[in-house]
Image (cartoon, grey):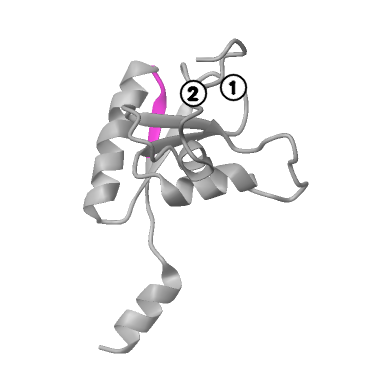
Amino acid sequence: LGEDGRLVAEDEDADEKLAGTSGRAYDLLVMGAHGIGRQEFSQLGGVVARVLRKIEKDALIIRNDRPLQGGKMMVCVDGSAYSYKALRVALEMAQDFDASLYVCSAFDVEYHHVVFGNI
């Protein structure tokens, strides 16, 4: 850990530093949604978008400074095993932070039109 609180690993190449693929032992990556060069209508910053495409760990993206304690959380379930894992974690987080949890159904409308249209 560097003097300014940043993680420092000089022996890693740029991709490893960016994507966290260096084998560091962590369970959850937490990042801000935007960096210094935020574009006005951008939903995700360039660095966080590249990182999300490359890591194989769970990630929590932070957009604002509101506390999680007592807040509202939403989890989307699409019937996949991954979404049920997300639901389990969301339930734990909601309990830990005394937050309300909203569960919604998520699916790709266009995908379903193609699949069911070909039956």
- Asked if residue 100 is among those painted magenta in the image, a careful observer would answer yes
Of 70 and 61, nearer the camera is 61
At a point 41% along the width and 22% down the height, the residue shown is: 99
How many C-alpha atoms fall within 10 Å of the one at disc 1: few (<14), some, or many (≥20)?
few
Quadrant for the C terminus in the image: bottom left
Image-quadrant location for residue 110: bottom left
User: Mark 1: which secondary structure?
Assistant: loop
Of 22 and 74, nearer the camera is 22
Would you say the magenta stretch is mainly helix, strand or loop? strand
How many C-alpha atoms fall within 10 Å of the one at disc 2: few (<14), some, or many (≥20)?
few
**Amino acid, disc 1:** Arg
Instruction: Please report the bounds of the magenta region as a residue range.
Output: 98-102
Q: Where residue 9 sits in the image (x, y, percent)?
A: 48, 26
User: CA gap, disc 2 to disc 1?
Assistant: 8 Å
Residue 95 visible to an observer of this rendering: yes
User: Mark 1 = which residue?
Assistant: 66
Numbered circle sitting on residue 7: none
At a point 59% along the width and 43% down the height, the residue shown is: 47
User: Mark 2: which secondary structure?
Assistant: loop
